[in-house]
Image: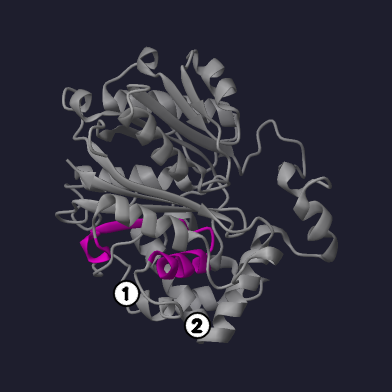
Amino acid sequence: MSGLRDATVVGVAESDKIGVVPDKSSLQLQGEATLNALADAGLKLSDVEGVFSAGFRPTEVAEYLGIQPRYFDGTHVGGSSFVVHLGHAAEAIASGRIDVALIVGGESGRSRVGLPAGFSGSHSSAQSMEGQFENPYGLPGAIGGYAMACARHMHLYGTTSEQLAEIAVAARQWAGLNPRAYKREPLTVGEVLASPIISWPFRKFDCCLVTDAAGAVVLTSLDRARDLKKKPVRVIGWGEGSDHQLISQIPDLTSGPGRISGPDAFAMAGVRHEDIDVAQVYDSFTYTVLTSLEDLGFCKKGEGGDFVSGGRIAPGGDFPLNTSGGGLSYTHPGMFGIFTIIENVRQLRGDFVNQSLRQVAGAKLGLVHGTGGKLSATGTVILAAD
């Protein structure tokens, strides 16, 4: 990054309401999140020069918001899209192409405002590769692909349902500290194991929520950030990767492209795994977390079950993970990646200083990691408190 400007996150926010919002469309939710994030930063819509979005075209989002961008990015790789956008936006700012970038995403995932019954997006249409080569054989969507990968991991490495359940329980414990989380009531390993099988080996509580929500992230240069309202959080390393689209074509069911994006992010940032103070790792399913931690290098392949056990990733543990409650207990409108960024920025700014159980004390370095498709694409970003 020598000779380039430091890119920083200066504003983050969700939509006014999250969870069940039956009276607002996806675009309305995104509009609210945008205005809230800009207010958090102390900036205006007229300051935004770059728009980054997935789901809706960035030109459509820009028109809805009344922005005429000189830079836009509609990279759409599922739930990892917004983490990938964070790296792209940082590059655009570092190079001087733009001064202020907006990343926004959200869906009416639960209430499905404006969506026809049964609509699930073009990825499952008869013309898609999934539609032609996987769906006719009965694979039950994303959950089927992740469940198949998880079953292989359990077979090869002895990973247990109890270990997966610890991920769900830790997420619920963090959610209990988050007043905006959709599910906050206590959850035990026994309750996870007693919940209904959805797609073996996944039970109900191994699977993410389906909610209505939107989130937005605002970036600018470090020089400009120091004149704004909130403590800036620098983007110091990022990576992205993909090694398949169809789950039937994944090179290794027990390993995803985090093994590509993670090392790139760490190398750019010049930090080590033990330097990370707080992490947000996409949790579409409990297995997503476990295999991602392995692929990122926090533990060896096959050791993820032991790594997440014993309360290690729960409040008070030595590896604070998904401190909002994640997609398993906080919110998950369809693509969750934007919310991993929001939570980690808040932790690094010390926004929860008056909530001592939720605030990770002294957090200076954070990692966000998104996964999209059926373990198909990942984005990894390392953030640093200024």
Which residue has dot 1 on it?
311
Q: Position of residue 293 (x, y in %)?
A: 40, 67
CB within 8 Å, label 2 to label 1: no
Residue 96 image-quadrant placement:
top left
- On the picture, is 224 further left or further right than 191? left
Q: Residue at x 51, y 87 (%)?
A: 158
> From the image, which quarter does the C terminus lie in?
top left
Q: Secondary structure at mark 1?
A: loop
Q: Secondary structure at mark 2?
A: loop
- Residue drawn at x 21%, y 42% is 349
- Residue type, numbered disc 1: Gly
Q: Residues within 10 Å of mark 1 (few under 14, many from 20)?
A: some
Identify the mark nearer the N-term, 2 or 1.
Answer: 2
Residue 173, horizontal then vertical, whole percent: 35, 63
* x and y percentages locating residue 238 in the rendered image: 37, 47
Is 44 on the left or on the right of 363, as rendered? right
Q: Quadrant of residue 135?
A: bottom right
* Residue 351: mark in rendering: none
Tag 2: Cα neighbours inside 10 Å, few (<14), some, or many (≥20)? many
- Asked whether residue 180 is in view, the answer is no
Measured along the vertical axis of the image, is residue 313 above or below residue 7?
below
Residue 302 included in the magenta stretch of the image: no
Q: What range is drawn magenta here?
A: 272-296
- Nearest the viewer among 130 and 28 is 130
Q: Nearer the viewer, mark 2 or mark 1?
A: 2
| Residue 262 in which image quadrant | bottom left
Q: Position of residue 291 (x, y in %)?
A: 48, 69
- Which disc number belongs to residue 159? 2
- Residue 224 seen: yes
